[in-house]
Amino acid sequence: MGEAKTHYEVIVVGAGVAGIYQIKRLLDLGVEATVLESAPDLGGTWYWNRYPGCRFDSESYTYGFSFSRELLDEWHWKERFSSQSENLRYLNYVADKFDLRKAMQFNCRVEAMRFNEARDLWHVKIADGRELTCRFVSLAIGLLSAPTMPRLEGIGDFKGRSFHTFYWPHEPVDLRAKKVAVIGTGATGIQLIGEIADKVGELTVFQRRPNWSAPLNNSAISEEEMADIRSRYDDIFAACALTPGSFLHGPDSRGFYEVTREERLAQWNKLYDEPGFGIWHANFREIFMDEAANAELSAYIADRIRTRVRDPKIAEKLIPRDHGFGVQRLPLETKYFEAYNRDNVHLVDIGETPLVRVTENGLRTSERDYEFDIIVYATGFDAITGAFDLIDISGIGGETLAEKWKQAPSTFLGLLIHGFPNLLMPTGPQSASASTNFPRGIEHNVNWCTNLLQYMWDRGYTRADATREAQERWTAHVAKMYEIMLMRKAKSWFTGYNSNVAGHEEGNVRYFLYNGGTPKFVAIANDVAAKAYQEIAFSSGERVDGQAATVSASA
Ligand code: NAP
């Protein structure tokens, strides 16, 4: 596994979807590279999140890697929206097929990284005490990999079992006849609740704010259907490349106000009953920007909820009032609303009666005590920058990334950070990968980063640093894109909100997503490459008094 080596040309941090593809590209080029992964095995998101109901909400065949025809021909996606265990099996299959494990080191948590300005090297400190050096680091650490717990007293006092969904146990959890609490109704809680409602004794859902959600409409994929999909893969990936979200669902080409209300309703009836993100991504563009258009759609979805939930009081509690449909990340659900029609499922509105503390036996709200055998925290993540904050990263002049990003992240294309040379981010804030069908964005970003490395190797450069001006321009561009979006007001990870992390509470909006869509992002990033990376300052050679032997800068 190469643990004895102490220097690599490239260190990739993280063996999830991005890390797997990045190491594949590097090994193909014959580069000395290794992956450091904190988990005991590969898979990232799909290694960790083992809660019941966890699955894609991207169509499986648009989520898989596109780089190998052989892989596409071999793999059979069994469901339109594949489950966590199958997704993990897929990632292992990819790693084994291309012999990638030989370049992966597990149980290696990167604690700190320091840029050595004299030698253009990163020093990477691992929790096991080792310190490695490398020219380049690719931080493939995921968007949603730093789970957060509520800031509640008494979490450690509970005598039953409790866990965050990210850390759902690897061995089966016996839920039968158990009294189970779920805190949180985001995409995770909604998947979990729909799945376990008929498998537990009593299920009590603690909901602070309801989330809009719509049916996933999953189904099996037969051998014949898979053969058809395989024959269309080129078209499928080409279609994904043309839509803003890199999904097969592209926006309605008609204007919201160009069609009649009846035509809009007919379209929404169709989209609601179709599989996947159509109701979000194949809708009229105005729903993301125009309050009135969004309100009309929200009212439509609210009515669909009312038809699915028998008790009108519960139905009203499940309908969001503080934000419109689709301005937060839309969860897709299976039997979620029907779960509340069951006698063993109870909804507690902790917006009205807040959680006060965890007790030895369960949970206390401002109203009463509840007793449980199991408490599940489906309380989300310190999104995107959270995983960066877990590593002590210092760049030029000893500046730390945590300090630089304290108020908000600033990047160039979401791929590079000024003052942190030779640091690549295939899944960073402000790039298109964060807001789109994830692997589609990742493949683009990893290819872009790998091409940049090749460009430097061909010319003997040892340092690449995005210029301050380029970074300021990009960050301003990302912020500007939020101006027209209703999303800018959302209390969700799309705007960097997390009530459980000091400084990330409501009010400090952080621009995490690139809202210009994939085609625009790809065009901009490719243009930067085609114009010889003018926004990046390159240099080479050992430094004397901070001066490089050769310098080729730019912008
Ligand atoms: P989330 O969307 O951030 O939802 C967290 C939930 O926990 C919210 O309902 C939140 O309430 C609640 N919560 C947080 N802190 C709380 C507290 N202290 N007390 C009470 N309630 C609290 O997190 P998530 O559901 O894990 O989803 C995160 C993202 O992961 C998704 O948006 C999606 O991108 C991804 N995901 C994807 C899939 C998939 O692809 N199939 C599945 C699951 C997740 P408030 O709304 O009031 O803050």
Image (cartoon, rainbow, N blue to C red):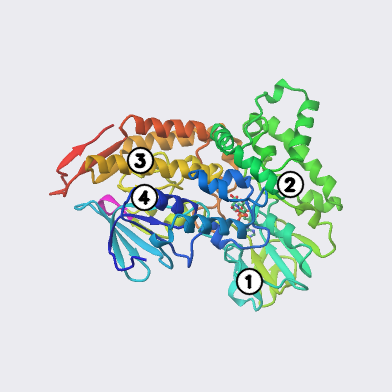
Nearer the observer: mark 1 or 3; the answer is 3
Position of 284 compared to 344: left or right?
left
Name the outermost residue toward the left: 544
Q: Which structural element holds mark 4?
A: helix
Height in image: 337 above or below 157?
above
Seen in the picture, residue 88 relative to 532 is either above or below; the reply is: below
- In the rendered image, residue 136, in percent from the top left (x then y), is placed at 31, 51
Residue drawn at x 79%, y 70% as measured from the top left: 201
Frontmost of labels 4 and 2 is 4
Mark 3 and mark 2: Cα distance apart in space: 39 Å
The reply to whether the C-beta atoms of the residues labelled 4 and 3 are less than 8 Å apart is: no
Is 153 rendered above or below residue 67?
below
Residue hosting label 4? 26
Q: Which residue is mark 1?
A: 162
Ligand 1, by image quadrant, is bottom right
Read off the magenta span.
Answer: 394-399
- Mark 1: amino acid: Ser
- Residue type indicated by callout 3: Asn
Q: In front here: 195 or 144?
A: 195
Point out the tag, 4 or 1, that comes first from the N-terminus.
4
Q: CA distance from mark 4 to mark 3?
A: 11 Å
Say if mark 4 contacts mark 2, CB within 8 Å: no
Image quarter where the C terminus lies is top left
Name the mark on residue 451. 3
